[in-house]
Amino acid sequence: SFRDGDTIVVEPFRARPFPVIKDLIVNRKALDRIMQAGGFISVRTGSAPDANSLPVPKPEADRAMDAAACIGCGACVAACKNASAMLFVAAKVSHLGLLPQGQPERYRRVLAMVEQMDREGFGACTVTGSCEAVCPKSISLDFIARMNRDYAVALLRGAR
């Protein structure tokens, strides 16, 4: 909490993958490139009447929706001492990987998105939790653990 007379410092995000454009404006296109690397499904989902043709148990649907709540704001990167994008990537990997439609690309997706995150120059995650604390959508660190499991399985399977 702030008191009357306190000094507040306003500055742009300090992360190499988010270069400053002008004043407080930063380029967050690195997050878009991570999404382009694997944030999609190729299964034909059909039209609206077909939505119920592939039932999803409520607990799995709820977890997928929790992950899908990520708005890609970059607050997690800004708060992290290592400028890691793990919470963002984990949320995006998980929201697709938790649904049946996302299973065909599950392991290729996690490899592609993590590799793109590394190419963009984001730091390594040390699970300090500062990302979770500042996330406006309360994305849980549990998604990072899930993504790490998927990543390990993908490496062992040689998914490409």
Image (tube, grey):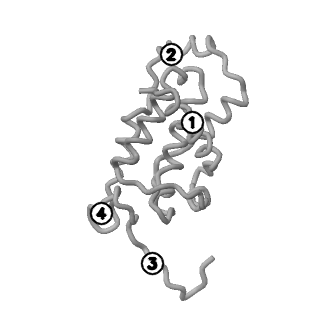
Q: Residue at x 59, y 50 (%)?
A: 137
Which image quadrant: the C terminus? top left
Q: Position of residue 118 (x, y in %)?
A: 39, 48
Among numbered discs 3 and 2, the one appearing first in the sequence: 3
Mark 1 = which residue? 94
Residue 14's label in the rendered image is none
Verify CB contact (< 8 Å) between mark 1 and mark 2: no
CA distance for labels 4 and 1: 30 Å
The amino acid type, in three-letter code, at marker 1 is Ser
Q: Within 10 Å of the Cα at label 1, are there few (<14), some (14-19), or many (20+) other Cα atoms?
A: many
Q: Residue furthest bottom?
A: 5
Lateral position of residue 17 relative to residue 66, left or right: left
Mark 4 = which residue? 20
CA distance for labels 3 and 2: 47 Å
Q: Is residue 44 above or below residue 64?
A: above
The amino acid type, in three-letter code, at marker 2 is Thr
CA distance for labels 1 and 3: 34 Å
Helix, strand or loop at disc 3? Answer: loop
CA distance for labels 1 and 2: 18 Å
Lateral position of residue 60 relative to residue 106, left or right: right
The amino acid type, in three-letter code, at marker 4 is Val
Q: Is residue 111 above or below residue 12?
A: above
Mark 3 = which residue? 9
Mark 2 = which residue? 45
Among numbered discs 1 and 2, the one appearing first in the sequence: 2
Among numbered discs 4 and 1, the one appearing first in the sequence: 4
Frontmost residue, 145 versus 18: 145
